[in-house]
C-alpha cells in the first residue's frame, strides 16, 4: 500500500514527523510548510504532483499483478526490504554513514511504526487483493483520514467540526463500499482485511507523532521499511506461503510489477512528494489523498477490466468527498 494515507491533523503525524521532508509511502503524512500566499505554482510542482497522483494511484494495480504469482506477505516483505536497503544506500551516500546511526529507543519506535504501516497496512492490502478488485481496495484505503480523525479524538485532540462531518460522510461511504462483500460479489474477507489495514495504517500514522523517532526522516523511513519488510517475511513464513512457492514460476508481469513498486512507488514518488512539501502549499500536496483512489479505480477498470458497480461508484464518490472535506477543513484550522 503505497496507497498513501493522509494525516489530516494540524500537527505533523508521521513516522518521521519533523520539520523536514516526510517518510516515504510506507509512512506518509503531511508535514511541511505551505508556500507563501499567492505564490505561483511552477511547472516543476505540477510535474511532481503528476508523479504522485499517477504513481501512487497505480500501486494498487501493481500489487494486483504481483500477488497473481507471488504470495502476498512475502511480496510485501521483499518489496520493502529491497526499498529500505536502497534508501539506506542513498542516505549514506548523501549524508554519510553516520546519518544511519540511531539509539535503541528511536530504533524501536521506528520499528513499531513500520510494523503498523507496512506489515499491517501494506501487507493486508496485498492479502486482500488476492480476492477483491484493486479499485475497491483503493477506495477502502482512501478512508484512512476518517480513522485518523477518530483516533486523534480518542487520544484527546479536538478536530474541527468539519472533520466530524467528514467522518460521518466517510462512514456512509464505507458502508456502501462493503455491499459487494456482503452480497457475495467479492470476498468479504478481503473487504475486512482492507478495513483493518486502513485502521492499522491510521494507528501507525497517529502513533508516530507521539513516539521518539530519528531526526532525519529518511533515516526513520529506512528502519520503518526494513522492520515492516522483515515482519512481512516472518508472517509469510508463519502462514506457510513458502510451501510450494517456486520463484521460477513467478510471471514476468509479477516481477515487473514488483520492480515498479520498489523503484517508482517507494523511491521516485516518495522523493517527488518530499520535494513537494518543501516547494508547494501543503494543501496542494494533500490533494493526492483523493486523487489516488480515482486513478486506481480507473486503471483497474481499463487494464484489468474490473467492474465499476454502483456500490463502487457511489461509495467511492462519498469517501472521496469525505476525504476532501476533512483535508480542507483541517488545513484551514
Image: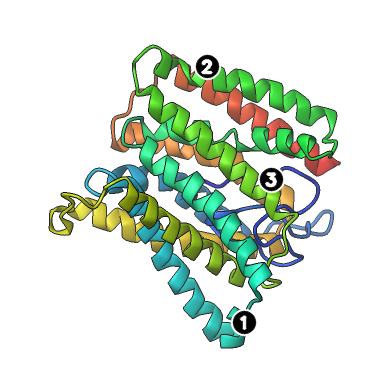
Question: Foreground mark, 1 or 2?
Answer: 1
Residue 237 circle label? none
User: Residue 327 is drawn in which quadrant?
Assistant: top right
Badge 1, how many Cα within 10 Å: few under 14, some, many 20+?
A: some
Q: Percent from the top left, x then y, of residue 256?
A: 27, 57
Name the residue tied to disc 3.
7
Name the residue tied to disc 1.
99
Name the residue tied to disc 2.
176
Residue depicted at 39% across the width and 27% down the height: 189
Residue depicted at 66% across the width and 51% down the height: 285
User: Residue 260 is drawn in which quadrant?
Assistant: bottom left
The first of marks 1 and 3 along the sequence is 3
Seen in the picture, residue 166 relative to 275 is either above or below; the reply is above
Outermost residue, top side: 183
Residue 275 appears anywhere in the view = yes
Cα distance, mark 1 to mark 2?
47 Å
Amino acid at each position: 500500500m503505497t496507497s498513501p494515507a493522509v494525516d489530516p491533523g494540524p500537527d505533523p503525524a508521521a513516522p518521521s514527523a519533523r520539520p523536514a521532508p516526510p517518510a516515504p509511502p510506507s509512512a506518509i503524512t503531511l508535514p511541511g510548510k505551505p508556500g507563501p500566499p499567492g505564490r505561483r505554482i511552477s511547472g516543476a510542482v505540477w510535474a511532481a504532483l503528476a508523479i504522485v497522483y499517477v504513481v501512487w494511484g497505480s500501486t494498487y494495480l501493481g500489487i494486483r499483478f504481483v500477488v497473481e504469482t507471488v504470495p502476498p506477505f512475502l511480496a510485501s516483505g521483499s518489496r520493502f526490504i529491497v526499498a529500505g536497503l536502497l534508501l539506506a544506500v542513498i542516505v549514506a551516500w548523501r549524508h554519510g554513514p553516520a546519518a544511519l546511526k540511531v539509539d535503541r529507543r528511536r530504533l524501536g519506535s521506528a520499528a513499531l511504526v513500520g510494523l503498523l504501516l507496512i506489515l499491517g497496512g501494506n501487507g493486508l492490502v496485498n492479502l486482500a487483493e488476492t480476492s477483491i478488485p484493486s479499485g475497491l481496495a483503493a477506495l477502502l484505503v482512501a478512508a484512512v483520514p476518517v480513522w485518523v480523525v477518530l483516533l486523534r479524538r480518542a487520544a484527546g485532540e479536538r478536530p474541527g467540526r468539519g472533520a466530524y462531518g467528514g467522518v460521518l460522510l466517510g462512514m456512509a461511504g464505507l458502508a456502501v463500499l462493503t455491499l459487494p462483500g456482503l452480497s457475495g460479489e467479492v470476498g468479504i474477507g478481503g473487504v475486512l482485511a482492507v478495513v483493518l489495514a486502513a485502521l492499522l495504517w491510521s494507528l501507525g500514522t497517529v502513533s508516530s507523532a507521539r513516539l521518539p523517532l530519528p531526526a532525519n526522516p529518511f533515516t526513520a523511513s529506512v528502519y520503518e521499511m526494513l522492520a515492516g519488510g522483515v515482519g512481512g517475511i516472518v508472517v509469510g513464513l508463519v502462514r506457510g506461503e513458502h510451501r510450494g512457492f517456486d520463484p521460477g514460476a513467478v510471471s514476468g508481469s509479477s516481477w515487473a510489477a514488483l520492480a515498479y513498486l520498489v523503484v517508482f512507488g517507494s523511491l521516485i514518488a516518495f522523493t517527488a512528494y518530499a520535494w513537494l512539501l518543501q516547494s508547494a502549499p501543503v494543501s496542494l500536496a494533500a490533494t493526492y489523498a483523493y486523487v489516488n483512489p480515482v486513478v486506481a479505480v480507473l486503471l483497474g477498470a481499463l487494464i484489468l477490466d474490473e467492474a465499476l458497480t454502483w456500490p463502487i461508484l457511489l461509495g467511492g464518490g462519498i469517501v472521496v468527498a469525505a476525504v476532501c472535506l476533512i483535508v480542507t477543513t483541517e488545513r484551514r484550522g
